[in-house]
Structure formats: C-alpha cells, structure tokens
Image: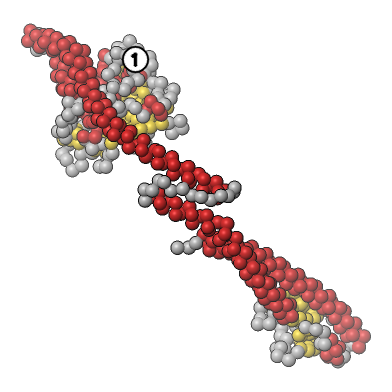
Amino acid sequence: MTHLTTRLVILLAALLMAVTGAYDYHHLVQERDRAITQAGEDVRVFAETLAVAIRKNVRRSGTTTELQGLLDGILARPGLMLVAVFDPGGRVVVSTAVPDVRPPAVDAAIDTALRRREPASFTLPTGSPQLRVIRPFRWLDDRTAAVEVRQSLADIEQDFTRSRKDVIVSRLVVLLLFVVSIVAVTRWSIARPVRALIRGARAIAEGDLSQRIDVTRSDEVGELAREFSRMAASLSTARQALLAESEARLGLEREVHQAQRLAAVGMLAAEVAHEIGTPLNVISGRAEILDRILAADLPGRRHLDVILRQTERITAIIRALLDYTRPRRPARRPEAVVPLLARVADVLAGRDRAKGVRLRLDLPWDLPFVLGDAEQLQQLFLNLLTNAFDASPAGAEVRVSAGPTPVLPEEGRVGIVRGKADEPSLPIHIVDTGPGMDAERLAHVFEPFFSTKKLGRGTGLGLPIVEEIVRAHGGSVEMLSIPGHGTEVIVRLPLALGEEAPSAARGVAAQEVRGR
C-alpha cells in the first residue's frame, strides 16, 4: 500500500521538477538562440567587411594574386572555419580553410546568391554545427561575385551543454532538501492523525460504534477527528432507533398493501356494478328486442347492429376491469391496426359532439400487422382516445399517426415510459392539444385510481389497464407532455413477423370523426 506521505512527496517532487526543469530548459534554449543570433550578426558583418576589402583589392591590383594572402591572414579569427571567393561564373577563385574541412564547391545556394544578388545565411546540419554566410559583391567588370564565410558554433553548443549539466545538479540538490523537509512534515502532521482515523474507521466497519478519535488539534485534521467521533455516536443512536422502526415499518407496509388491494377491488366492483352494469343490461336487452322485431332490410338497421356489437365489447371491457388484479393472457395473433382503430373511432363518433372535438386517423393502410389480442388492443386504444377527448378543448383535434419519432417538440417536454419493447415494434402516436401535465403529475398517471379529470368523470383505471395490456403484449407505452401545449402517447406493439396477415377491409387512409 502506498502511504500518503510517499504519494505526496512524489507528486510535489515531480511537480517541482517539471516546472523548474521546463523553466530552466526554456531559459537555456533562449540563451543559446540569442548567442547563435549574435554570432550570425557578427559573421554577416565580417562577410560584408571582407567583401568590401576583396573588391577594393581586386580593383586596385587588377588581379586576384593578392587575395590568398589576405584570406590566410584572417583565418586566425576564433571559430572561423572557411573563407572562399567565387567569381561571376561560380568558380572558386581563392579559398582557405582549417584542417578537416572540405574545400568549397559551387552549390544551389551559391548559384542563387549570384543570380539574385542577395545575401544568404543559414545553419549547416552537420556533426559540428556551422553558420554559413554568402555575401555577393561587384567584380571587376561589374558582374556579381560572392564571398562565403563559415563560422563554427561548437563553442556555443558546449556552453549550452555545460550550463544544462550545472542546472540539473543544482536542481537535484534542491529537490533532495525539499523531499527531506516534506517527509518530515507530512509524517508528523498528516500521516500520524490519518492512521488514527483509519483505525477508527475499520473499527466502525466491524461494528464497534463505541470507537472515538482523540486528536487535539485546531486545524482541519482535528476538526475531522471530532466530526468522526460525533458521527460514531450518531450512528450508534441511529442504529438502535432503526432496528425498532424497521420492525414497525414492515408490519405497517404489509397492512397498507393489503388495504390498498382491498380498496382497489372494492371500488372497482362498486363502480362496475352500479355505474355500468345496470344500464348496460337495459341497453343490451332493449337492443335484443329491437333486433327481433325490426326487419333485416331497414335502412337504419346497421345502427342497431353497431349497438349490439358494442354492448358486447363493453361487457368484455367490464370483465377486463374486474380482472385488473388478475389479468388474463392475451390471445395474440396478427392484427391490422388501421381497421381496429377505425372501429374505435366508430364507437367514439358520438362522444363530445357538443365540444366539437375531432378525431383524425392519419395512418397509411399499408402499415405492418402487429401481434396482439384484438379485443384487448381495442380496449387499449379506446382508453387512450377517451382520455385524449376528455383533455381536448372545444374545437380541438385528436390526431392518431405512426412514426419512429415523437410528434411533440423536445423543448419543455417531460416523459414517462412503462414496459419495454424488445422485439421490432410499430409505434402508434395519439396526440391531443389539451392542457398537458408537468413532471410531478406525469409520474403518477399509471398509478391505480390517480386521475386528472374532474370528480365523477373518471375512475383512474384507464391508464393502469393500458399498462397491463401493453406489458402482456411485450410492448411499451410512453407518455410525453408539454404543460400548456398538449400530451402525446406512443404505444409500441410488437410486429407480426413471419406470420400470415389476416385479410382486412381497406378504406380511406385518413378520416375525421366529429364528436357530439
């Protein structure tokens, strides 16, 4: 295990070396660059002076015989390695150099300087760094000649290397003194009280809540020790209270859960029996009487057929409500969504006609088939569309569509998801323009008996039943809402892959149903 003192020393030493090393190296490099720049200026001035002297010598004597003596006399300059004179044709007229330096030769740099009549200077990338300066000047016939001077930079590089070694040695000495000081301070001031805290924490982890830390200091470490002791005392008190409360809470939770289930079943039975059962029986009985006495070819007979068929559906829905606590497994088979929704729209044709709410089925007839129980899916969409109708203001439109992305904009949108559609699924969107819901209300919409409707308008079981149906089908239901702008419900139902789709009637892809 790495001790805190060791890690702190390593970190601080590395930081110190990195900062001071980078600064010293940058400073040394700047000093070397300044020395090289100054050397370059000196060599350029020397080359210009030499070019003037050569031109005067040649013009005075009319020959180049005295140039060799002139060059041999200046080779004693410190660091000077080579001096050469080139005529306008680029040939070497005269040259001198120290031993081990190759004689000068015409290259691209000489040709460029002669042609452009411009001086040039650069560093040669050789084993021993050299500064090369080429200075053009006028020859006897006013054509351009050039003088080349090479200066050694070895002394500058040696000074740089020597200074670097001196800096490294001095920094290592400072680092050693720094490390010794940090080790002494941290072991006494930090490591000792931290080890006491570690021993106390281990004792508490093993269940000994009587452990206390005795560190008499007025800094942060002392405050941490005092807080540790107070924490241990609070944990000891809280553990005793928690044990007593846990036993009481378990018993209370069991009682509350049982009471909730009994209340749900009781309220459901009372609502169904009193509010729906009796009038439904009356409607069904009267419809059966009319079915027996009316002729089969009457023009309005189809309305009676709708009443009979829908009363049977309502009876099935009532059974599903009563089976909420014991839902049946769906009889899944390939189903076409559009005809199913068209039947639901027919049921809702007379709903809220006074408000003028419209239902728009914006669905293509070539939608893929889903795998589901037609009766349960019809109940699912009936519950969702009923909620959308109730939430919509007068003259509004409830739209049903299909697509991979939500219809409501993302800005200001809150959402909740129930179930998980693992298989390839078909998303159906139901969008209203009602008041919407905030995140707090949306979090409770799938709870039994929670309702945003006015008293007497809903039982709060519609969305819980939707959730049960969706989960039983292996799909998901997502509710999105923007307060003040509307709500969108996305139902994802598994596709009927590899199944033979049943035949279904075809009709108009989009339709509007006006409510009463």
Label 1 sits on residue: 454
For the point 36% across and 35% down, the residue is: 241
For the point 36% across and 19% down, the residue is: 392
For the point 68% across and 82% down, the residue is: 128
For the point 55% across and 56% down, the residue is: 190
Report the side of 258 relative to 397 (left or right): left
Looking at the rendered image, the quarter that the C terminus falls into is: top left
Across and down, in percent, residue 410 comes to: 43, 33
Across and down, in percent, residue 352 comes to: 31, 13
Report the side of 110 relative to 249 (left or right): right
Is residue 114 at all visible to an observer of this figure?
no
Looking at the rendered image, the quarter that the N terminus falls into is: bottom left
In this picture, is 308 found above or below 254? above
Secondary structure at numbered mark 1: loop
Is residue 134 at all visible to an observer of this figure?
yes
Q: Give whichever of 302, 254 is nearer the camera.
A: 254
